[in-house]
Image: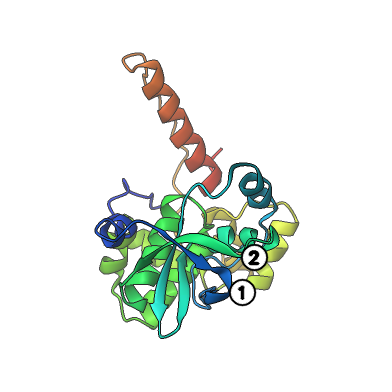
Amino acid sequence: MSKKTEFQALDLISAYTEKKKHPSFFELAQIFPNPIQPRIIGKEDVEDLVQSMDRLGLLEPILIRKDKNKYWIVAGERRYRAAIKLGWKEIQATVTDADEEICYEMALAENEKRKNLNPWEVGKAIQYLRKEKKKTAEEVSILLGYTERYVKQLSSIARLDQKTVMEMIIAGKPTSVKNLESVLKNKENRGGEMISPVSAKLKITVDLNGLTVKARESFHRELNGLKKKYGII
C-alpha cells in the first residue's frame, strides 16, 4: 500500500490568517456552515465539544469567509455547532479573504493534518478537487503531502456510497484503507485483486534509545495515530 509521506503541505490556514487582525466576535446568526466541506460523517456529533467549551470556553477561534452579508465557515464547524447547543449568541472568529476554492483546500488541509477525516472522506474531497476543480493528482498530492499513487488510491475508495461506509462504522469495523478497498472490491464484484497491491508483511525494528524521553513519547503518539488511521496492527 502506498504510504503517506511526511506532511509537506503548506499550512494554508496560517498563511491566510497570519497577517489578519486579531479575532473578533460575530453573532452566530450571521454565520452559516459551508454546504461543501470535506467532513461528511460526525460533524453534528459535538457533545464532547459542548462539555469542553462549557468548562473551558472557546480555545481556538473559528475561521470564516465573508460573502455579501453572510459569513461561511471555513474551519471550526463543530465548534460553531457546540456554541449553538450551549446557547451562545456570538463566537470568536477570524475572517479570511481567500476565495472559495482556496478555503475548501484550507479546510481539507486542516482536517487532514488533525486526523479528523477517515480515508473515505479524504477520497471524496480528492474526488471533488479533481473532478469539479480540475486539480491534477500531483497538485492534490502537494496539498496533502501524499504520494500521487496514494491520491489515486483514495479517489478509488470514494466510489463507495455513504450508506456503505456508515454500515461499516455502525458495525464497529475500522474505516481503514484496506477495509474500504475490500468492501469496494466486493461491491463491484471484482476478483481477488486489490486497488493497491498487498505486499508481504514486513517487520521493522526501530531503536529509540538515542532519543530523549520527550522525543520518544512524541514518536509513540505519532505512531499510534498512524496505526489508528490506517488500520495497522
Q: Is residue 76 visible?
A: no
Q: Is residue 45 above or below residue 103?
A: above
Q: Is residue 15 above or below residue 157?
A: above
Q: Identify residue for label 1.
A: 161
Question: Could you tell me which secondary element the residue under label 2 belongs to?
Answer: helix
Foreground residue among 102 and 89 = 89
Q: Is residue 91 above or below residue 158?
A: above
Q: Are marks 1 and 2 in contact (CB under 8 Å)?
A: yes
For image coordinates 47% across by 38% down, the residue present is 201
Disc 1 residue crowd, few under 14, some 14–19, many 20+, Cα 10 Å: few
Task: Tell me: 21 left or right of 73.
Answer: left
**Percent position of residue 144, x then y:** 34, 58
**Percent position of residue 151, x then y:** 37, 63
Q: Is residue 70 visible?
A: yes
**Percent position of residue 118, x then y:** 54, 57
For image coordinates 53% across by 78% down, the residue present is 35
Q: CA distance from mark 1 to mark 2?
A: 7 Å
Q: Identify residue for label 2.
A: 165
Q: Amino acid at mark 2?
A: Val
**Percent position of residue 80, x then y:** 57, 63
Q: Amino acid at mark 1?
A: Asp
